[in-house]
Amino acid sequence: MLEGVIISLGVPKNKGLKTIMPTRIDKEEAFADLVRDYEDQWVAVIEDDGVQFVVGNGPTAVEAAKQATKRGHSQARLFKVPSFSVRLVY
C-alpha cells in the first residue's frame, strides 16, 4: 500500500543557515529506505526539490506507471526493486 513516503535527498533551502550536502552513501541509504517496502516490485519515483517520492508500485512496470499517471506523474522514473534475498554484484 502506498502511503506518502518521503525521503529528503537534497539540501534544505535555509537562508543564512549552514547546511551540509549529504554524501553519496547517505543518498543511497535514504533511497534504500524509500523502496524497502517494495521488495520484488516495480516502483515509479519522482523527485521534487531534492525529495524523492514513490508515486506508484506494482508487480509490473505497466501497473506502477498507471498508478503514477493516475496521480498526475506521467514522467516518473520506473525501476524494479530486487528481491532482498538476492545479492547483486557490480
Image (spheres, helix red, strand yellow):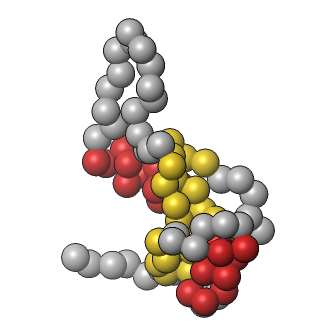
Image quadrant for the N terminus?
bottom right
Between 7 and 51, the one nearer to me in the picture:
51
Place of residue 28 in the rendered image (x, y in percent of width and height, measured from the top left) = 37, 54
Q: Residue at x 47, y 43 (%)?
A: 49
Q: Is residue 55 above or below residue 24?
A: below
Image quadrant for the C terminus?
bottom left
Q: Quadrant of residue 89?
A: bottom left
Place of residue 30 in the rendered image (x, y in percent of width and height, measured from the top left) = 46, 49
Determine whether, in the image, residue 83 is placed left or right of residue 72. Answer: left
Determine whether, in the image, residue 90 is placed left or right of residue 39. Answer: left
Q: Quadrant of residue 55?
A: bottom right
Between 56 and 27, the one nearer to me in the picture:
56
Q: Residue at x 51, y 49 (%)?
A: 48
Determine whether, in the image, residue 31 is placed left or right of residue 90. Answer: right
Determine whether, in the image, residue 43 is placed left or right of residue 66. Answer: left
Between 24 and 90, the one nearer to me in the picture:
24
Q: Is residue 45 above or below residue 82?
A: above
Q: Residue at x 49, y 77 (%)?
A: 78
Q: Is residue 25 above or below residue 36?
A: above
Q: Is residue 62 visible?
A: yes
Place of residue 51 in the rendered image (x, y in percent of width and height, measured from the top left) = 51, 46
